[in-house]
Image (cartoon, grey):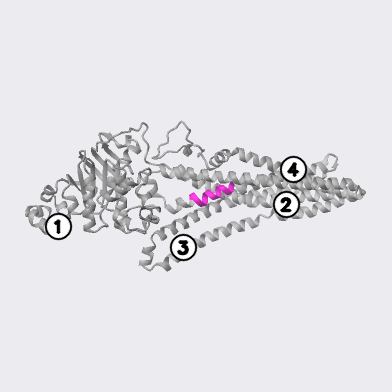
């Protein structure tokens, strides 16, 4: 875990100043740096609390004095003291209200900063990171753990500070009214006696509740991740009638979480300082009466003393709850910091190169890549594409076609070799230069829960309506969008679930066309549309492919046969490359892709090729 100074460079794919604002060398330092960011509010709260609690401490002393004045029937002084008592109570209440408002503002601003920092960190992480973590776990840290850190400020710091200040003020009040015997403050004997067992129990409780707090938050994350995964795959659950099985698994995980929370409650029940304080109040009353009987004390001071001892009750009682919140907050901070400090893998260039205009020349030089560092999914791949060429990539499932294109967009970094655009290694290119000049349509289309217009304009938020409509027309999407009741203002729902597969793909194509990229990638982009719509989309795409370098991953002959270069992949390697006619004559792997077309079999299959393969 490393603290990044403002002079250091952020190496992730995305940068925001909030990512280096806080100290991440440990969870405690991180929390303190967040708290100190709002130190004005925190110190204001503490100052107001000190004044309010000081008034609360003066109240029992004044009330005791009233008892003594009543005995001598000095009613004028009684009225004066009663007025002072009332005034102190009102002012103390107002100060408590203001202090509570201030600490709430501080805690909410702290939680806001944590969420901002966390989301900025998520945006900076590489795809390798997002492949490794569970979305539900990430969400739990962003919600539940962040809330626990919030509770560490309010009510935890609020309770702890008021408890400490309240105890100190009560002791100060006792010093003010105590009689002395050979220099010994007699009224402090009982607090001195009860303090050691209370602090011993508190220390033991604090240590015991820490591990179970971490377990609770991990179980919550596991439950959240499991729930999200199953809800996203609910159609599979229902298709295989696995509701009872999934219900039992969820119940098992939920029971584990419930048992852990109960265990924490049992630990808290064993911490019983309130009983000790309650006993001490009774002892204080007996002790005060005894001092009165021997002539050291008067009735008013007995009342004040018992009230001051009772004032210790609430701070000590809240102390146990504050300890739970402290451990939950520390556990939450530890889990958040673990994510914030996790390596991003993809590093930002030290001196990024910004290209204002790309030509579109692409070269792979002996590129190899593995997801886990062991099994290579791309091995020794080399080829060169001239600006404006159309390249088709074919091969069996799992041959590395999609991975190859993800390396081009630098969603992952190569293990060895180089990928160059216009002669520049993409690892030296500015991320914005690279990704805003590459438009990619994947098999799994992702749309966000917003309007059709917002989804199309996602990469170009300032686009005019005319530009959005033009892109939709080019993607053959305008016709069906216009049929919606609200047209381009129609809400598509989460992940575009209200749209058909073909509709989602055409909106995604419109989204890509709107940013007008120099390099286009279509990963089976027309797989969910019928032949008629595919032909319409292809005609539209053919117009925008002019003067652009493009890659098409597909097995549709109509899409491949007119490509300038066809690359055939198998087990992560390039086994052949050339034009459609050349490969049908020379590559059995390519021929097998189209073996179902009878005209191709009759025209191109040669016995020598089959014999050679056998």
Disc 1 to disc 2, how far (Cα)?
A: 86 Å
Tell me: 249 left or right of 523.
right
Disc 2 to disc 4, how far (Cα)?
A: 16 Å
Residue contact between numbered discs 1 and 2, judged by CB atoms under 8 Å: no
Residue contact between numbered discs 2 and 4, judged by CB atoms under 8 Å: no
Tell me: 114 left or right of 352.
right
Residue assigned mark 4 = 54
Q: Mark 4: few, some, or many residues within 10 Å (few <14, many ≥20)?
A: many
Q: Is residue 215 above or below residue 6?
A: below
Q: Nearer the viewer, residue 430 or 128?
A: 430
Disc 1 to disc 4, how far (Cα)?
A: 91 Å
Looking at the rendering, which quadrant does residue 500 occupy? bottom left
Q: Secondary structure at mark 4?
A: helix
User: Which callout, 1 or 2, points to the residue nearer the camera?
Assistant: 1
Q: Give me the residue at 66% from left, 54% from top.
A: 271
Disc 3 to disc 2, how far (Cα)?
A: 42 Å
Q: Earlier in the sequence, mark 3 or mark 2?
A: 3
Residue 250 tag number: 3
Q: Secondary structure at mark 1?
A: loop
Residue assigned mark 1 = 595
The residue stretch that appears in magenta: 141-152
Tell me: 389 left or right of 71.
left
Q: Nearer the viewer, residue 36 or 30?
A: 36
Q: From the top left corner, tell me how far across and down residue 412 is, in percent.
A: 33, 43
Q: Earlier in the sequence, mark 1 or mark 2?
A: 2
Residue contact between numbered discs 1 and 3, judged by CB atoms under 8 Å: no
Residue assigned mark 2 = 313
**245 drawn magenta:** no
Q: From the top left corner, tell me how far across and down residue 133 is, in percent.
A: 41, 50
User: Which callout, 2 or 4, points to the residue nearer the camera?
Assistant: 4
């Amino acid at each position: 875990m490393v603290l990044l100074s403002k002079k250091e460079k952020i190496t992730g794919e995305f940068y925001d100043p909030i990512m280096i604002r806080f100290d991440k060398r440990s969870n405690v330092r991180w929390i303190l740096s967040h708290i100190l960011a709002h130190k004005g509010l925190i110190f204001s709260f503490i100052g107001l609390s000190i004044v309010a609690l000081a008034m609360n401490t003066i109240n029992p002393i004044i009330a005791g004095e009233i008892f003594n004045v009543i005995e001598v029937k000095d009613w004028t002084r009684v009225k004066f003291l009663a007025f002072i008592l009332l005034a102190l109570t009102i002012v103390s209440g107002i100060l408590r209200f203001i202090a509570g408002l201030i600490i709430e503002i501080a805690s909410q601003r702290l939680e806001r900063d944590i969420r901002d920092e966390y989301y900025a960190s998520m945006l900076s992480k590489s795809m390798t990171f997002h492949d490794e973590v569970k979305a539900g776990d990430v969400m739990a840290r962003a919600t539940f753990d962040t809330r626990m850190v919030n509770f560490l400020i309010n009510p935890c710091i609020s309770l702890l500070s008021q408890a400490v200040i309240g105890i100190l003020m009560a002791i100060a009040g006792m010093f003010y009214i105590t009689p002395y015997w050979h220099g010994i403050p007699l009224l402090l004997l009982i607090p001195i006696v009860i303090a050691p067992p209370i602090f011993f129990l508190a220390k033991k409780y604090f240590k015991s509740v820490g591990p179970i707090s971490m377990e609770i938050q991990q179980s919550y994350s596991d439950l959240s991740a499991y729930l999200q995964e199953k809800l996203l795959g609910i159609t599979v659950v229902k298709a295989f009638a696995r509701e009872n099985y999934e219900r039992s698994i969820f119940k098992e995980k939920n029971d584990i979480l419930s048992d852990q929370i109960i265990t924490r409650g049992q630990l808290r029940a064993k911490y019983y300082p309130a009983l000790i304080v309650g006993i001490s109040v009774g002892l204080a009353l007996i002790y005060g009466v005894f001092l009165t009987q021997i002539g050291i004390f008067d009735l008013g001071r007995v009342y004040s003393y018992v009230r001051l001892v009772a004032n210790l009750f609430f701070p000590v009682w809240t102390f146990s709850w504050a300890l739970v919140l402290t451990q939950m907050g520390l556990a939450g901070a530890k889990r958040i910091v673990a994510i914030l400090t996790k390596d991003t893998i993809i590093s930002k260039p030290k001196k990024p190169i910004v290209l204002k205009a790309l030509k579109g020349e692409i070269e792979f030089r002996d590129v190899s890549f593995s997801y886990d560092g062991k099994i290579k999914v791309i091995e020794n791949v080399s080829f060169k594409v001239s600006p404006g060429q159309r390249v088709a990539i074919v091969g069996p499932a799992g041959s590395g076609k999609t991975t190859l294109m993800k390396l081009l967009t630098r969603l992952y970094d190569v293990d060895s070799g180089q990928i160059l655009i216009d002669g520049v290694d993409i690892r030296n290119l500015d991320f914005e230069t690279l990704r805003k000049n590459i438009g990619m349509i994947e098999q799994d289309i992702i749309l966000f829960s917003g309007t059709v217009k917002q989804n199309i304009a996602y990469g170009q938020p300032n686009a005019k309506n005319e530009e959005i409509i033009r892109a939709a027309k080019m993607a053959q999407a305008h016709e069906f969008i216009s049929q919606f009741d609200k047209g381009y203002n129609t809400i598509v729902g989460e992940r575009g679930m209200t749209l058909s597969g073909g509709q989602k793909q055409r909106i995604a194509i419109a989204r890509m066309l709107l940013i007008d990229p120099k390099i286009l990638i279509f990963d089976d982009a027309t797989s969910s549309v019928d032949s008629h719509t595919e032909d319409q989309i292809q005609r539209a795409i053919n117009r925008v492919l002019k003067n652009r370098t493009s890659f098409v991953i597909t097995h549709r002959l109509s899409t491949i046969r007119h490509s300038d270069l066809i690359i055939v992949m198998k087990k992560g390697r390039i086994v052949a490359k050339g034009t459609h006619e050349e490969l049908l004559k020379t590559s059995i792997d390519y021929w097998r892709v189209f073996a179902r077309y009878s005209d191709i079999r009759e025209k191109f299959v040669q016995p020598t090729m089959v014999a050679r393969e056998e």
